[in-house]
Image (cartoon, coloured by chain):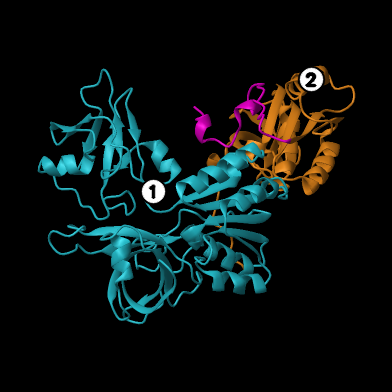
Chain colours: A orange, B cyan
């Protein structure tokens, strides 16, 4: 049983969920995250429309609204936050996997959790980082489910931990405890 | 690692100190330099930390019939301190601050080791320090540390004309690159505040210390200017008069004790013949911490300055001197206390 209140996995990374917009923000970067043609874009655009409607009374320029793939979103948001003043908010909508990746960059650029609002449209895919070979695997496995590592082919358990720094879930070898093992040879 | 040998700042050891210097140059404010009575270095501390000074009882019939304890922010060097520096505003006659103002060089004092409750956020892009009156004291150590480590910091001090505590320290830190602004009337400060709060680079954290009215002014302006709660840090100074609260019942040691309005849990337990170790009796020192269980539907109101937010949320202990339970409708007792 995963106790989510003590886990680093946000609830929105388990099932789609739209965060509450903080009306106290003075300026906003709103990004619909997704590759062109992604089937999730229409739902993400709808969330973005709902947010912009709530911010309609803001002066021109207070809300910058963009639609970008994840890597491009990381670049523009990093640049935004470099110029921003306290009072700025970041609104992200897209898949949980994309939101986790972009959130990692936004936090690295100095944002606090209560400055980032996330609207997730789909949470079936996640990335898993292998502690053994450091490769990253995209999977639809659930938390505590298993997937095969794209780097070393080990069976990995998707541990209910998400790195705030990378947005990847932690993966470790499913049957590590049952493996034959011996003391390593002493180094010469 | 948590040390048991007494040098860790997190261990609240009792320090035997001696007054080695006094400065009364600012009216109503006394600055003291305290050193270890045996000449040893003192435990290092996080900027913004305070020590709790034990104040002995006054003579019988005086305004201070029992020992108490007051928290004072440390203003000096934090890394390898050879002395502790505090500044004390003379408040109520007969209280702890008046006792401090009567100390002489060479007098011995006892303090509980430094405790951090107002630490700088290490990842902050900039530290904005707003203090009023004697509330500048924890911010002096913040600014000192920021200058030492080359961190971006800006301090604004609001104080009455001619009553600027630590003016010399602040001037010295300004000369070493810190931005320091002094304002001597509230209107000028209010005029400056919104501008200041709306022009801070993203990543700035705000630290505010002063009288309750000042902190309300700053936190309200910060909220209005779009600051999220995570970037706003406040340190209460002095102890505000607490409201008497509603009466409640506690289950303790197999019996039920009534706590009337205006009587503290600590006093009620003492009246019932139950001993609770205590010192400051104002929610500062942590000495009267008791384990509690809050019944279903019950609520604990902490009101102390000792526990951190997580500990308060957990609701497993309380400071008997200031914490209260809200009356519940159904439960047999509003709070269980485990002595």
**Span shown in magenta:** A1-26
Indicate whether B300 appears above or below B211. above
Residue B324 lies in magenta, yes or no? no
**Which is nearer the eye, B83 or A99?**
B83
- In the figure, is residue B52 to the left or right of B49? left
**Residue A79 image point, x, y percent:** 83, 45
- In the figure, is residue A175 to the left or right of B269? right
Residue at mark 1: B305
Indicate whether B285 appears above or below A166. below
- In the figure, is residue B268 to the left or right of A112? left
Magenta stretch: helix, strand or loop mostly: loop
Residue at mark 2: A49
- The lab-note entry on whether marks 2 and 1 share a chain reads no
**Count of numbered circles in the view:** 2
Q: Residue at x 67, y 29 (%)?
A: A23
Q: Residue at x 30, y 64 (%)?
A: B98
């Amino acid at each position: 049983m995963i106790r989510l209140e003590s886990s680093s996995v946000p609830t929105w990374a388990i099932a789609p969920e739209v965060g509450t917009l903080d009306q106290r923000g003075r300026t906003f970067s709103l990004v619909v995250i997704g590759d062109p043609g992604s089937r999730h874009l229409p739902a993400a655009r709808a969330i973005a429309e709902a947010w912009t409607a709530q911010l309609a009374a803001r002066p021109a320029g207070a809300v910058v609204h963009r639609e970008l793939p994840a890597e491009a979103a990381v670049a523009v948001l990093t640049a935004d936050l470099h110029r921003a003043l306290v009072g700025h908010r970041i609104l992200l909508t897209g898949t949980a996997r994309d939101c986790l990746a972009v959130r990692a960059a936004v936090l690295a650029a100095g944002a606090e959790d209560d400055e980032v609002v996330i609207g997730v449209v789909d949470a079936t895919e996640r990335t898993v980082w292998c502690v053994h070979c450091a490769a990253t695997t995209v999977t639809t496995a659930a938390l505590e489910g298993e997937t095969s590592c794209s780097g070393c082919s080990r069976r990995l358990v998707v541990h209910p931990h998400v790195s705030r720094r990378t947005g990847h879930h932690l993966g470790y070898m499913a049957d590590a405890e049952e493996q034959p093992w011996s003391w390593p040879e002493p180094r010469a | 690692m948590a040390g048991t040998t007494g040098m860790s700042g997190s261990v609240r050891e009792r320090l035997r100190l001696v007054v080695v210097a006094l400065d009364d140059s600012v009216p109503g404010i006394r600055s003291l330099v305290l050193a270890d009575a045996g000449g040893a270095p003192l435990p290092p501390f996080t900027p913004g930390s305070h020590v709790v000074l034990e104040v002995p009882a006054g003579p019988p019939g005086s305004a201070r019939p029992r020992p108490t304890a007051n928290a004072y922010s440390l203003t000096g060097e934090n890394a390898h301190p050879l002395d502790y520096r505090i500044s004390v505003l003379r408040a109520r006659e007969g209280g702890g601050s008046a006792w401090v103002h009567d100390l002489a060089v060479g007098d011995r004092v006892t303090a509980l080791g430094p405790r951090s409750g107002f630490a700088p956020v290490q990842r902050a892009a900039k530290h904005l320090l707003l203090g009023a009156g004697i509330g500048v004291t924890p911010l002096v150590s913040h600014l000192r540390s920021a200058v030492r480590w080359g961190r971006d910091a800006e301090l604004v001090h609001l104080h009455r004309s001619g009553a600027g505590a630590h003016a010399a320290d602040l001037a010295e830190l300004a000369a070493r690159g810190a931005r320091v602004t002094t304002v001597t009337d509230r209107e000028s400060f209010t005029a400056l505040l919104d501008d200041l709060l709306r022009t801070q680079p993203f990543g700035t954290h705000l630290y505010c210390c002063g009288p309750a009215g000042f902190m309300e002014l700053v936190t309200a302006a910060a909220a209005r200017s779009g600051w999220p709660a995570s970037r706003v840090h406040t340190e209460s100074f002095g102890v505000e008069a607490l409201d008497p609260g509603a009466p409640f019942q506690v289950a303790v040691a197999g019996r039920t004790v009534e706590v009337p309005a205006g009587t503290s849990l600590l006093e009620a337990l003492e009246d019932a013949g139950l001993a609770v170790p205590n010192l400051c009796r104002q929610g500062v020192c942590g000495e009267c911490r008791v384990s509690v269980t809050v019944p279903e539907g019950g609520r604990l109101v902490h009101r102390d300055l000792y526990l951190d937010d997580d500990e308060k949320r957990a609701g497993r202990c309380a400071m008997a001197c200031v914490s209260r339970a809200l009356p519940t409708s159904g439960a047999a007792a509003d709070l269980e206390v485990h002595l």
